[in-house]
């Protein structure tokens, strides 16, 4: 799969977020908001899931945005236009249920902002009033603000350190919005603690909250069991049953533990391969 372009969207405080467009006509023709691909950068590499942020069926191109967090995302970030990815499988997962809900709030934290973008666009296209609440640690790490402003009715921008937009967390802004006006759906993507906090904030208001989970995946097709999560006391596979679930039903403690399993091994592999 040929890489057509690469752009560094953010690079600050040890966090780098890259945008890559890839020639992939079959996936571009079928992709819908909320779906993802599983890619391999090279033949020996691991498979990683990434949300399809844009799909242009006419040009046969998909756009992926990744934060360089582990060995493979760093390898991906080092890929250059003209090069190729070893494989991409997709589109995977259930698409987001897009319909006219009324007032929809999309909450994006960090690289999760990229993942709410296609859903925001589709929700707006379905006639919803769309409010995007986006947050990053600092100004330099804010992504896709302009793009979200183009398709949303309102965009609230927050940074943890107050260096841009309003100082504070997306969950504080979400609570204020819910107190001010009745909303019909909240959709959130970001770090697990943020999504867990969204579940807590939305519960007293009785507003449905959907989250797209970034569970660890291997095959992405329901065969390995690696991405299992407990939702409403049932075992679900993020790749085939999700990636979206009811935030109030997710066992967040278990998911946080599972997602932390490989952190030390990732660091070790990066050191072995001289990848910072
Ligand atoms: S990634 Fe293997 S079952 Fe979901």
Image (spheres, grey):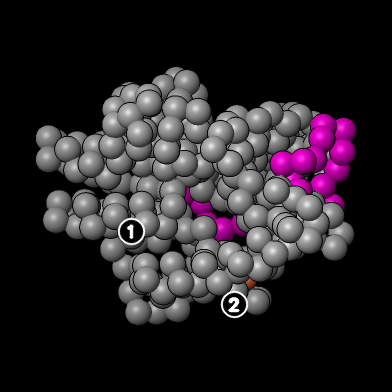
Please tell me how crowded label 2 is: few (under 14), some (14-19), or many (20+) other residues with Cα within 10 Å. Answer: some
Looking at the rendered structure, which numbered label has been put on residue 4? none
Q: CA distance from mark 1 to mark 2?
A: 22 Å
Badge 1 or badge 2: first in the primary sequence: 1
Q: Is residue 208 left or right of residue 260?
A: left
At 15% from the left and 51% from the top, the residue drawn is 205
Picture quarter with ligand 1: bottom right
Element class at badge 1: helix
x and y percentages locating residue 76 in the rendered image: 74, 46
Q: Which residue is mark 2?
A: 225
At 75% from the left and 38% from the top, the residue drawn is 22
Q: Is residue 103 left or right of residue 117?
A: left
Span highlighted in magenta in the image: 75-96
Residue 21 higher or lower than 193, as above or below: above
At 65% from the left and 77% from the top, the residue drawn is 224
At 52% from the left and 66% from the top, the residue drawn is 259
Please tell me how crowded label 1 is: few (under 14), some (14-19), or many (20+) other residues with Cα within 10 Å. Answer: many
The answer to whether the beta carbon of the residue marked 2 is less than 8 Å from any atom of ligand 1 is yes
x and y percentages locating residue 172 in the rendered image: 23, 41
Q: Quadrant of the N terminus?
A: top right
Return the residue nearer the eye: 217 or 30. Answer: 217
Return the residue nearer the eye: 226 or 93. Answer: 226
Q: Is residue 160 magenta?
A: no
Can residue 118 be spotted in the picture?
no
Can residue 170 be spotted in the picture?
yes
Q: Is residue 76 magenta?
A: yes
Element class at badge 2: loop
Number of residue marks = 2
Q: Which residue is mark 1?
A: 196
x and y percentages locating residue 140 in the rendered image: 50, 28
Q: Is residue 8 left or right of residue 134?
A: right
């Amino acid at each position: 799969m040929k890489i057509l372009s690469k752009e560094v969207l953010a690079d600050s405080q040890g966090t780098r977020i890259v945008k890559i467009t890839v020639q992939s006509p079959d996936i571009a023709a079928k992709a819908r908001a909320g779906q993802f691909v599983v890619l391999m950068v090279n033949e020996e590499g691991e498979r990683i899931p990434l949300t399809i942020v844009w799909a242009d069926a006419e040009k046969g191109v998909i756009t992926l945005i990744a934060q360089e967090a582990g060995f493979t995302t760093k390898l991906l970030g080092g890929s250059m236009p003209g090069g190729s990815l070893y494989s991409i499988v997709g589109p995977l997962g259930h698409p987001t249920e897009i319909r006219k809900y009324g007032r929809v709030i999309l909450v994006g934290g960090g690289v999760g902002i990229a993942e709410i973008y296609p859903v925001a666009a589709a929700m707006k296209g379905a006639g919803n009033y769309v409010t995007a609440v986006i947050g990053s640690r600092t100004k330099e790490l804010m992504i896709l603000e302009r793009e979200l402003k183009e398709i949303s009715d309102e965009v609230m921008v927050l940074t943890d350190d107050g260096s841009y937009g309003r100082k504070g967390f997306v969950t504080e802004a979400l609570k204020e919005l819910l107190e001010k006006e009745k909303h019909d759906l909240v959709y959130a993507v970001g770090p697990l603690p943020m999504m867990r906090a969204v579940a807590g904030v939305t519960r007293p208001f009785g507003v449905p909250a959907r989250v797209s989970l970034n569970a660890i995946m291997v095959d992405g097709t329901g065969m390995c069991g690696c991405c299992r999560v407990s939702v409403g006391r049932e075992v679900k596979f993020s790749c085939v049953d999700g990636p979206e679930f009811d935030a109030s039903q997710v066992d967040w403690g278990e998911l946080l533990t599972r997602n932390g399993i490989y952190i030390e091994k990732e660091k070790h592999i990066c050191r072995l391969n001289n990848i910072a």
